[in-house]
Image (cartoon, helix red, strand yellow):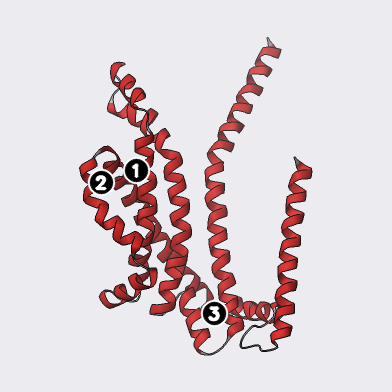
Amino acid sequence: MNHSTWTTKLVLLIAILVFLFGWHIVALLVHAQVILPGPAKTLMALWEILGSSPFALNIWATVLRALESFVIILVTGTLLGIAAGYSRHVHQFLKPLLAVCKATPVMAVILLAFIWFTSATVPLFSAFLMGFPVMFIQVVNGVRSISSKLEEMTKIYGLTKKDRLLHLTIPSLAPHIITGAKSSLSMVWKVVIAAEVLTVPRYGVGSRMQLSQVNLETDRVLAWTLIAVFLTVATDILFEAGLRLPKQIKRMSHKKLASNMTMAGTGQ
């Protein structure tokens, strides 16, 4: 297992080095910093950005918008998804909204939202419209995948609604909610930053990218792009770690319990 892990990490490192080398070669061939600066120039711009005073404010503004959108999507998508999963009438009622959200281009949503709302609200609204269908459909599929036979058995054995919710509905929906949450979170980052690029609020990663592009600072555009990629990857890692934590705690508690039982048996 350890050998396999190290091999995987080595392959990843080689892939990154090959990408950076290819980037460097193409930048040399282009020989125009305004079109494609090399990795070294981009890293220098990244270092300058990290040391600037408004850096934390820009990051915080984007993170806050993304998290607000994600929470709204998670709550509304889960609740309406459960309702639509159990009621065909609710599902039919929400079908037009889903069709509009899925078919409308992201840029069109952002431009329309910019007409209706302030620049700070546009990323929230746009991210919600793009991420909600993903969460909603996953939850609906989760509800419909619950075994009808198991539901009948819970009723036959007289389980209360609370017990059915805790021991049947939630465990059955959990994988679908997790999948929908992860997919919608990745989408939220892209839409929020794209909305910031178009609306240019006072603070935000997308705002800095747009201002750098206007000033033809391509190295800073690439540097802010790397920051955006890092934010997405970091949240994915935290999301995965949060999912593994309960399993690890449960595994550790089981090991400790088994150890205590062994020691007790030896002591007897």
Q: Position of residue 47 (x, y in %)?
A: 65, 77
- Label 3 – label 1 distance at C-alpha: 45 Å
Q: Is residue 18 visible?
A: yes
Mark 2, Cα crowd under 10 Å, few <14 / some 14-19 / many 20+, is some
Query: Do callouts 2 and 1 mark residues in contact (Cβ within 8 Å)?
Result: yes
Q: Is residue 201 visible?
A: no
Q: Secondary structure at mark 1?
A: helix
Q: Position of residue 4 (x, y in %)?
A: 75, 44
User: What residue sits right under mark 1 in the picture?
Assistant: 140
Relative height, residue 5 to residue 268 (above, below): below
- Label 2 – label 3 distance at C-alpha: 49 Å
Please report the residue visible at 38 percent of the width from the left and 73 percent of the height from the top: 107
Type of residue at label 1?
A: Val
Relative height, residue 250 to residue 24 (above, below): above
Q: Which image quarter: residue 162? A: top left
Q: Secondary structure at mark 3?
A: loop
Where is the N terminus found, in terms of image quarters? top right
Of residues 173 and 242, which is closer to you in this image?
173
Query: Do callouts 2 and 3 mark residues in contact (Cβ within 8 Å)?
Result: no
Mark sitting on residue 53: 3
Of residues 221 and 112, which is closer to you in this image?
112
Q: Nearer the viewer, mark 3 or mark 1?
A: 1
Please report the residue visible at 47 percent of the width from the left and 68 percent of the height from the top: 60
Of residues 233 and 262, which is closer to you in this image?
233
- Image check: 174 left or right of 48? left
User: What residue sits right under mark 2 in the picture?
Assistant: 91
